[in-house]
Amino acid sequence: MPSRKPLSDGPCPVARSVDLIGDRWSLLIVRDAFDGLRRFGDFQRSLGVARNILADRLRKLVEAGILETQDASDGTAYQEYVLTPKGESLFPIVVALRQWGERHLFARGECHSVLIDRRTGKPIPFMAPTTKDGAALLPAATEVRKVS
């Protein structure tokens, strides 16, 4: 079976991003890191992923500068994986996926986890692109300028 062609050298930012973090496990690792998980075993328990796949995805996320390893905060010999500033900048993407899922993948009244603003104790408001003056920015009002 031929391997897929990497998109990391193309001119599309979406393709490059998906090439790096678009697989199921990478995004779920990032989600779990936002939820406070740091250790290999914790990621494995949360995700139920095979050790070799988890090790591969963690390695790729570290190499990409999304996660970094550091000595365990409790002084044990373990390594912990923590989000870098580059990794933390993925937060709006995780929130957008969460909110899309809440709107389209759950039946009315079906229970699901909720992202809460710690300061207010309330669910965070829906995220949407806006224009400079704060109006909703709809897809039809945008265009992609391709590199020629």
Image (cartoon, rainbow, N blue to C red):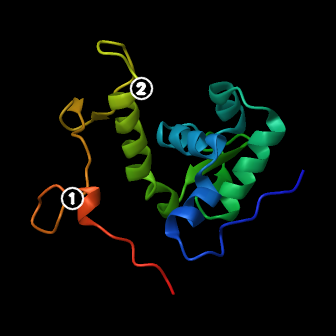
User: What residue does disc 2 label?
Assistant: 105
Residue 66 horizontal side relative to residue 140, left or right: right
Q: Nearer the viewer, residue 33 or 48?
A: 48
Residue 58 at x, y = what percent? 70, 49
Residue under the image location 32 percent in, 30 percent down: 103
Residue 142 at x, y = what percent? 28, 67
Q: Are marks 2 and 1 in contact (CB under 8 Å)?
A: no
User: What residue does disc 1 label?
Assistant: 137
Q: Amino acid at mark 1?
A: Leu
Residue 17 at x, y = what percent? 56, 61
> Is residue 77 visible to the viewer in this orientation of the structure?
no
Residue 8 horizontal side relative to residue 134, left or right: right
Measure how far apart labels 2 and 1 are at the Cα level. Answer: 23 Å
**Name of the residue lying farthest toward the right:** 1
Q: Residues within 10 Å of mark 1 (few under 14, many from 20)?
A: few
- The disc at residue 78 is none
